[in-house]
Image (cartoon, rainbow, N blue to C red):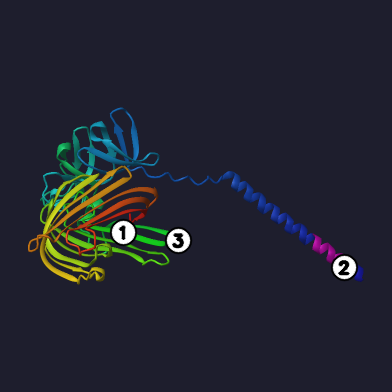
Amino acid sequence: MLTITRFREGRFHRTLAATLSLFLLTAVSGLAQDAAKKPVAPAAKKEPEIKEELTLKNGDRLTGELLNSTGTEIKFKTELAGEVTVKWENVKELKSKRDFAVVPKDLLDARDSAKVPQGAIKIGEKGIVVSPISTTKPEISAAPPGPEAKPGATREAAAKEIPTSKIAAVVDDAMYQKEINKKIGFRSGWDGHITTGTSMIFSTQNTSLYQVDTALKRSIPTVSWLDPKLRSTIDFSLSAGKTTQPGTETTITNIFHLGGERDEYFSPRGYYLQVFSLDHNYAQGLVLQQKYGGGIGATLFKKKESELDITADLHYESQQFQANPSIDVEALELHLVASTLTEDYTRKWGKLQFSEKLLADVAWNNASAFSASGTSSVRLPVYKRLAFSVSTIDNFLNNPQIGFKKNSFQFITGFALNLH
């Protein structure tokens, strides 16, 4: 009896297993047939959107993005060639679906958006045609509106052609709106670099020298197609070192400068300025020199690759000289009313950056209290924002204490970190 029961249970299990297997086989076969009937197409690769197409007179076509333009050239960004600059005279046509703002040259204030043509553009050989889109309200009429009339419909306003000779800038309309309505915070607009270098010698003489130079500049606004409003500069330099030798007196080098200037523009090229500076030069016996004043400045020329500024001010100046015990000279302190004439020049040749600044300080109540300085630097990028720097600093002081030289010269090499 037990044997018959086991036999029946085994047959039941085998029947159940066979039934399940047949069911699974049928289901898989059905799914396979459905899959065969409806093949799954592979996901299409999304191609990057092409915003503009630039056609040149020689037939070449560039696809990518129009960055900005002036009346003489167009800056265009392509995926393969990167950023390229094309002379306007070589352009035949530009096709674009974006809206742009075309800033005329004769416009006094580019922030006046009502006088800046905005909309779709079509670039030709002689200029730009701007086709603005304006929203119109339905006209009030006794007759019922036609079937095509829609409330709030848009229509294309009259296109306006601007010759290339009258174009100051062409920028993306979204960027234009952002810049003219931008709220400037204290941390906005800063640029500049920090340079540092050090030297160590361990021998009969032990020498250590550390040098740091920081130049910061803040311009408001940050785009060139808007007239400048404010500009602030801060510069700091420090050279500190010590030389020791057994049996001889320790020699200390300690020179630092801290200066600042704030410019408020009353015209695109003219500005009022406020200045201050603090100087200490142990090598010339100068404990501290302080300057506080104001004046006027002008940008003689400003281009994409170069700029030249000159300034003149009237300031209060205090000079404190240290005593020289070896020749029995007491400490000296002078209070002066003086003026400073300054020339500041910057220039770029590709990635190479050059800057120089000359300064002459004349005291009106003490003819012998004359000082001058000159700085220059060359920076060559080596990796991303890191650049190799060579700079010189020359300070002249006409009235140092007896026993100190009138001139101190520094030649510095190191690496500079650019903020942008």
* Sequence-wise first label, 1 or 3: 3
* Sequence-wise first label, 3 or 2: 2
Where is residue 272 shown, x and y percent of the image?
Answer: 11, 58
- Three-letter code, disc 3: Thr
- Three-letter code, disc 1: Asp
* Sequence-wise first label, 2 or 1: 2
Callout 2: few (<14), some (14-19), or many (20+) C-alpha neighbours within 10 Å? few
Secondary structure under tag 3 reads loop
Image quadrant assignment for residue 83: top left
Where is residue 266 shown, x and y percent of the image?
Answer: 10, 56
Screen quadrant of the C terminus: bottom left
Image quadrant assignment for residue 77: top left
- Residue 243 relative to residue 395: left or right: right
Where is residue 279 shown, x and y percent of the image?
Answer: 23, 64
Secondary structure under tag 1 reads strand
The residue tagged 3 is 204
Q: Nearer the viewer, residue 130 or 417?
A: 417
Q: Is residue 117 magenta?
A: no
- Three-letter code, disc 2: Arg
What is the number of the mark on residue 6? 2
- Residue 28 relative to residue 108: left or right: right
Q: Nearer the viewer, residue 329 or 155?
A: 329
Query: In the rendered view, would you say 43 is above or below 232?
Result: above
